[in-house]
Amino acid sequence: MFLDTLPAILATRVGVGITEAAIMTVCTTLIVDYWHEQRRRAKYLGLQTVVTTLSATAFIAIGGAVGAAGWRTPFWIYLAAAIIAVPMIVLLWEPNRADAIDAHLRAEKARIPWRRLALPLVVGLFGGFTFYVLIIEAGYLLVGAGVAPTDTPTIGGIAAVASLATAAGAFTFSRIAKVGPRSLLPVAFGLQAAGMLIIWLIGGVPGVAAGAIVGGAGSGLLLPTMLTWALASIRFDERGRATGLWTSAFFFGQFLTPIIMGALTATVGGSLPVAVGAVGIACAVAAILLGFGLRRVAAASVEEIPVAA
């Protein structure tokens, strides 16, 4: 609100990014700690994505509206954080370490379970990239399809509908979570692939709109599925660090999105729809690999049970 130089403003954005990462990590960790039963945990992880998506859509709309009063005005919206910080002090609580459900803190510092986290971290990195492709590129795709850059109602309207599709995908997760990540992850990546291929093969405003909706639904299903999968086998004393690592991987994928898309667009001759289609093909490959790979891992785990017993 009060800074006048670009370096100082960028420095504050770094600070905001650090605190946002902390908020995401702590909120996810608390959800996993508060609810042990898988169905309820899945419900709240799905609702977390729903609330995140809807609030992002709402705050972007509000920011655009109040931005007419000047570029500084939207930053007053951050006061919402101060308003909700007060009830957090009363309403949030630390998980009960005496709870017999979990194997709780040991005397020594818990080691990072790299073996269990390796594949979820790789998938989280790739999922962070694919999650933001359509969010970042939808406006450019619409302008490339003939929508005037000044036609904010059309661009904003399609973006809002795609965001609602993302929220719907996340909301659906809590109702189908019992199917399990080994089935839901391929479906989520498959929906993303379908949406991006629709944009590439159909094209035009209808193709971009339809593809953004289908892909958005896949993204909404993908995020809570990846989280549930990554944290399912993590012990209580490992959760904070494991959640932080996974959040870092997801956000790093987000950071890489514009860089990769810029390089990919240049590689395919400057055609953004073709670049999006190439990412869609990668999503389809990921869906196939995860579909077969996770089933093989599950089968191997079942075979090892008698030996372990």
Image (cartoon, rainbow, N blue to C red):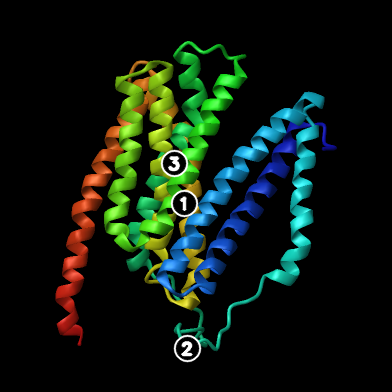
Q: Nearer the viewer, residue 198 or 134?
A: 198
Residue type for callout 3: Phe
Residue type for callout 2: Ala
Q: Residue 269 appears at what percent x and percent y? A: 35, 16
Residue type for callout 1: Phe
Q: Quadrant of residue 274?
A: top left
> Which one is closest to the eye, mark 3 or mark 2?
2
Q: Residue 149 appears at what percent x and percent y? A: 58, 14
- In the displayed structure, would residue 44 be above or below residue 132? below
Kindly identify which residue carries mark 1: 171
Q: Residues within 10 Å of mark 1 (few under 14, many from 20)?
A: many
Q: Residue 113 appears at what percent x and percent y? A: 39, 70
Kindly identify which residue carries mark 2: 100
> Which one is closest to the eye, mark 1 or mark 2?
1
Q: Nearer the viewer, residue 210 or 126?
A: 210
Marks 1 & 2, CB-CB < 8 Å contact: no
Count of residue discs:
3
Q: Residue 181 appears at what percent x and percent y? A: 32, 58
Label disc, if present, on residue 198 of the rendered structure: none
Q: Residues within 10 Å of mark 3 (few under 14, many from 20)?
A: many
Q: CA distance from mark 1 to mark 2?
A: 30 Å
Kindly identify which residue carries mark 3: 131
Seen in the image, is 286 located left or right of residue 206?
left
Q: Quadrant of residue 200?
A: top left
- In the displayed structure, would residue 194 be above or below residue 232? above
Q: In the structure shown, which secondary structural element does the residue marked by tag 1 occupy?
A: helix
Q: CA distance from mark 3 to mark 2?
A: 37 Å
Q: Earlier in the sequence, mark 3 or mark 2?
A: 2
Q: Is residue 272 visible?
A: no
